[in-house]
Amino acid sequence: MWESPIYNFEREREDENNGKIKKEVFTIDVTGSAPTMGVPGGQLEAVFKKISEGKKPDKIHILDFGAAKLRNTLYLLKKGFQVYSVEFKSVYDRPQGKKILKKCEKYKNFHKITFPDDFYKMKDKFDIILMINVLNVIPLFKERLCALSLCRNVIKNNGLLLIYHMRIVSANPDKYSNKNNLNDGWMTSMNQKHKHFYTEPNRDEIFEMAKSTGFSHNKDFKLSGISGNNYSYIFNPDDIILIENSLGLNEVMKGGRKHDFKKIIKEEKENFLLKLYFEELEKVDAGRGKGDAKRFHRLSARILSRVFDNQLGNLKIEQEVEEGIGRIDIVFENKMEEGFFKRLQNQINCPLISVECKNYQKEIENPDFDQLSARLKDKRGLFGILVCRGVKDKKKVLRQCKSKLDKGEHIIVLEDKDLQNLVESKLYGEPEDIDEYISDKHNEVLLFNETKN
């Protein structure tokens, strides 16, 4: 992957003159949009100052991933940081690239890394990783996730990741239309042989990409006030890469997935992380002590979070309760704004929704229901979800749920196929499909009668 920064994309559009579908091929150079200015600019300099406060420059290793024409690298070198610049050879070889490269090479704290081969061989770990206008110029969604994952693999446990994106669509809406859109973004420099690509993921999309690759937002850094209208966020590497198998990350790192820049790539409109989450969940081995319980737990959390994004919020993982005596695998706040969970609040008290995850090969048993039952309290919330890999004896499960219902506790069970149905409803169905599905699961418990089933 990334042996070349050149992509050839084919897109299909209806001809305005005759209404027939016509195919067009466009060539994109992802390095072509590298800015020509020789300094970072006031806003970026303010961000650099903020994230390096209190640190000794000579002890801090910074990875400038997608260093472009080295303007940020040179600035940080002058400040005394150990800087590793990562870029394609073609960028280093351009006139401006060569000019600034010569200046950088005068510094002993400069380290040049040619992408991708040198990067894959690299053993260093970094205190700070910069991704400045990188993700938003990569035309393939999965490759953005791969880039983030590669950075996750080389960042220190207490390191900081800066994602910084310029916002230009809202300022120039006339330049971005159906005439030049491609995949989930747009092409610019349409009069040139090699076009440039630009997309503008919003805050929620940036955060979800980060979460899928093991990063979480650091709320202590308030950068919006100093970065102007641009997206500027700091993330910490505090979790696992959730989608590494679906991305084929090990194969990428070994150079097993080649990028043939002559190959024509069809336009890719879908960039559904939710779909990748379920694909990854299916690859997780089940079994107490054998399977990957943590991965199953995290993937279930992301799936439920995205499926019910309009109804549930403020997701917490492994939330401590009872002064640290117990933990709940997943806790959501009920937004009480729409759908099933708003209606549920009219029936029972459920400000919080508790979820327990069981990555078992065997059937879930009484202790699993008892564990979730113990987490349900009137003030906390009386609705819980038990997520498992599969159910063989449905009557047995419903019997367990009904026994808790007699105590005023509402528990439903979601297995793999339920998560799949919810994902498909979210991606391809109508909004009410999700509500109907989860309502049916709840009603199964409410209406269960042993003698009539």
Image (cartoon, rainbow, N blue to C red):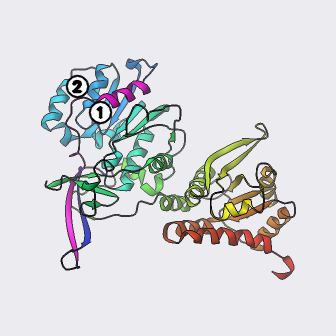
Q: Nearer the viewer, residue 15 or 316?
A: 15
The image quadrant of residue 191 is bottom left
Q: Position of residue 282 (x, y in %)?
A: 55, 62
Asked if the residue under mark 1 is in contact with the one under mark 2, i.e. CB atoms within 8 Å, the reply is: yes
**Which segment did they paint magenta?**
21-50
The image quadrant of residue 128 is top left
Residue 237 is inside the magenta segment:
no
Residue at mark 2: 104
Residue at 33 percent across and 52 percent down: it is 199
Above or below, 231 against 53 in this view is: below
Residue at mark 1: 85
The label number, if any, that marks residue 232 in the structure image:
none
Give the side of residue 438 with respect to residue 17, left or right: right
Residue 29 is inside the magenta segment:
yes
Residue at 58 percent across and 67 percent down: it is 422
The CA distance from mark 2 to mark 1 is 10 Å
Q: Position of residue 109 (x, y in %)?
A: 30, 22
Crowd class of label 1 (few under 14; some 14 to 19; many from 20; radius 10 Å): many
Say what secondary structure mark 2 lies in.
helix
Crowd class of label 2 (few under 14; some 14 to 19; many from 20; radius 10 Å): many
Residue at 28 percent across and 41 percent down: it is 115
Q: Quadrant of the C terminus?
A: bottom right
Residue furthest bottom in the image: 452
Q: Nearer the viewer, residue 61 or 361?
A: 61
Amino acid marked by disc 2: Cys
